[in-house]
Every structure is written in C-alpha cells, then in structure tokens.
Amino acid sequence: MLHNPSTRLHEIEVVLFEPFRPMLSQRLDIQAIETDLRARDFYYVEPKFDGERFQLHYRDGKFKYFSRNGHEYTRTYGEDASS
C-alpha cells in the first residue's frame, strides 16, 4: 500500500507489519528555533538512526522495521530482542 501513490490514507486502514506513509516533519527557520521552543510548553524530538527514520512495528515479541519509503530493515536490526 505504501508504494501505490494512488492509494490515499483515508481509503485504507493501518495494518501491523505493513508499512504506511507517515506525515512528514515541518522545517523550521533556524533563526526561529529558540523563540519557537520557548513559546511552547512541550515539544517532540524525533531521533534518526543511521540517517533513516523508522516505523517500528511490534507484536508478540517480534519486530519489523520500515524506512519512511517502505523499505524493510528487519534483517539489519533483528526481528526479536535476541537478534
């Protein structure tokens, strides 16, 4: 479903162990960062691993990792805690 550009999120449901296209982060003007952060009560920081953002799916002790573009990285990072 991620690789089909004609499919819209409102037409499908999110399914565990199937990648989905996430909402992209907003770019913030570097000069406005301090002002913007001080004006908020809280904010989120999204860590990146090796230059990729991942969706991590987990159920019954099994993991699946997907890149933002829907490529699977489970073999790289392991499908369970012992990997």
Image: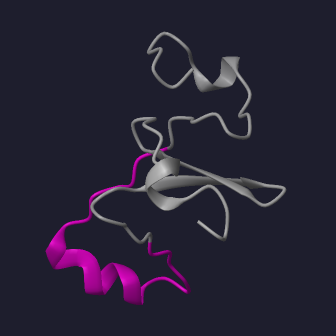
The answer to whether 3 is drawn above or below residue 67 in the figure is above
Q: Residue 4 in the image: x percent, y percent?
A: 47, 14
Please say whether residue 31 is one of the residues in the magenta stretch: yes
Camera-side residue of 38 and 74: 74
Q: Is residue 18 left or right of residue 29?
A: right
Residue visible at 68% across and 17% down? 11
The quarter in which the N terminus is drawn is top right
Q: Is residue 62 left or right of residue 51?
A: right
Camera-side residue of 52 and 38: 52
What secondary structure is the stretch in magenta mostly built from?
A: loop
Q: Residue furthest front?
A: 82
Q: Residue furthest right?
A: 60
The answer to whether 18 is drawn above or below residue 7 in the figure is below
Residue visible at 67% across and 62% down? 80
Please say whether residue 24 is one of the residues in the magenta stretch: yes
Highlighted range, magenta: 23-45
> Which quarter of the figure has residue 53?
bottom left
> Which quarter of the figure has residue 25?
bottom left
> Which quarter of the figure has residue 63?
bottom right
Residue visible at 15% across and 77% down? 31
